[in-house]
Image (cartoon, rainbow, N blue to C red):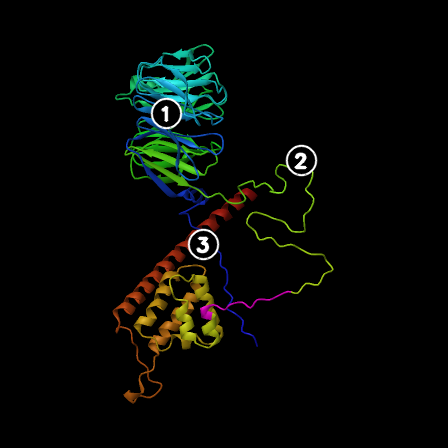
Amino acid sequence: MEYQPVVVKSHPRPSTSKHNAESRHWRQFKHPVFIKEYAPITSIHFSPSKPHRYAVTAATRVQIYAPRTQKITKTISRFKDVARSGNIRQDGKLVVAGDDTGLIQVFDINSRAILRTFDSHKQPVHITKFSKLSPAHVLSCSDDTTAKIWDVPSQSPINTFTSHTDYVRSGQISTSNPHLVLTGSYDSTVRLFDSRSGHCEMVMGEKLATHATGSTPVEQVLLFPSGTVALSSSGPIIRIWDLVSGGRCIRALSNHQKTVTSLAFDATAGRLLTGSLDQMVKVYDVSSYKVVHTMRYPAPILCLAISPDETHIAAGMSDGTLSVRRRQTKTLETNATDPLRSSTFESFLGMSHPSLGEGNYRGKAQFHPLGSVDELRIESRRTKRLRDYDKLLKNFKYSAALDSVLRKQVPPTTTFSLIQELIHRDGFKTALSGRDDVLLEPVLRLLVKYVADPRFGEMVCNIASMVIGALYLRQLKTHLMLPKEMYSPILGQSPLIDTLFLRLQKKVAAEIRFQKELVKTKGALAMIFASSVAINES
């Protein structure tokens, strides 16, 4: 009769709240690449168009990185002072950046040639951004307390907003309305401007600035894609403003310990990423504004960005370190095109490609051509290779088979499946017999580890009773001249075995107490449900 290998039973895994689906998604961003610059990194921006190159601004240059290789493809260093806020246009062809002299320059991303120069600001320019809906317009925010909208072709300012009374260090043009501009200033206010009227239409945080002592400056602002809700960070506090209700603060978040320096949305704007000087990046669910994940970095964070395809998270730090975390996308997430249909007229006409053989090609799967139905096929059966414990079990080496599954790298389902097979063969007592304290230690450690596991609890109890019985009923050596029915306990002879038995005893006692509490809770819930049903029926 042919030997039947041990069948490893599959058990449902106990639910763990340590890593939920949200946390597992953000934990996929791993294998961080650290790139050292010689000055603090003040800005990171991903290109909205593929291949999503990103601009890193540090010292007197803006560097363009390739997302796949993390290598520098272009370096723009035509600045007289510290460069600020390198921003790539929607089509990925132009880059705009300011510097501490107040100069704003527009570059061609490929040739690095200076296409336009704006020199109206007299103080450092910390924000330069292209408008998403009006690619020919650029927003600039400066320390001269003004914010301007520039027309790139004419090289002249269209609007100048002068309502702030201190440095303007953050700003954004709305992605739903190109006429709305949101700015944040060190005067502790967030203002919403309309370029059609040229005036400030809404002020947020004015009461906090006038009534609060020691008001904190606004470091960052961010608009939701809908344009109805705005975010701002002042110190460690993030505030959510409802623009529809006149700029009312509807929520304040204080999960960071130090100043929040960067705000960013993911591709769907369903998650908010915040970076802070406390070296932490926190991910919020915008539906409840609860922290769903936290990432730790080695230095204070000055800027943060996530790629539009959600495969890269880049963070710039105060010590000049650029950290890029990558996530490998699954095959199902990428829309792979059929190589046979690319660049053919059939794809434009919506026609199906004529079948070239009977097989299908999907990703990295192996190609298996199928012949006609009437042809004769000879199947070749490969004999399954037995595992080590199956080979030992086949040769009736029960003790060695048990030792082979007591190693750390063997999953518990395999271990207990083999023990169950040994019990069915009436060979588990044989496998336990003749063991000293060294060989008995892994058996006891297995029992201690899984005695409270609901998948193996019953079997662990049976094994424990057999182990204890084997210890108390071990036959004395024949040279003692005792009858065969005389046995003697060996507990107390090995400190390691005694310690493991005490741990097993404590764990069993704790599990019994826990089960009693569960029974009490179950009874209380049954009474509550019964009384509620009786009230409803009456």
Q: Is residue 38 left or right of residue 458?
A: left
In this view, the mark in front (2 or 3)? 2
Instruction: Quickly name the residue at label 2.
Output: 345
The quarter of the displayed image where residue 509 is located = bottom left
Instruction: Quickly name the residue at label 1.
Output: 85
Q: Is residue 314 visible?
A: yes
Q: Which residues are magenta?
A: 379-389
Instruction: Quickly name the residue at label 3.
Output: 14
Find the distance from the CA under tag 2 to the CA under tag 3: 53 Å
The quarter of the displayed image where residue 207 is located = top left
State the SS at label 2: helix
Viewer-nearest residue: 138 or 218:
138
The residue carrying pointer 1 sits among few (fewer than 14), some (14 to 19) or many (20 or more) residues within 10 Å by Cα, namely: many
Residue 198 percent coordinates (x, y): 43, 10
- Residue drawn at the location 42% of the way across and 40% of the way down: 69
Q: Amino acid at mark 3?
A: Pro
- Label 2 vs 1, first from the N-terminus: 1
In this view, the mark in front (2 or 1)? 2
Q: Amino acid at mark 2?
A: Phe
The answer to whether 491 is drawn above or below residue 32 in the figure is below
Viewer-nearest residue: 296 or 425:
296
- Label 2 vs 3, first from the N-terminus: 3
Q: Is residue 258 left or right of residue 72?
A: left
Q: Amino acid at mark 1?
A: Ser
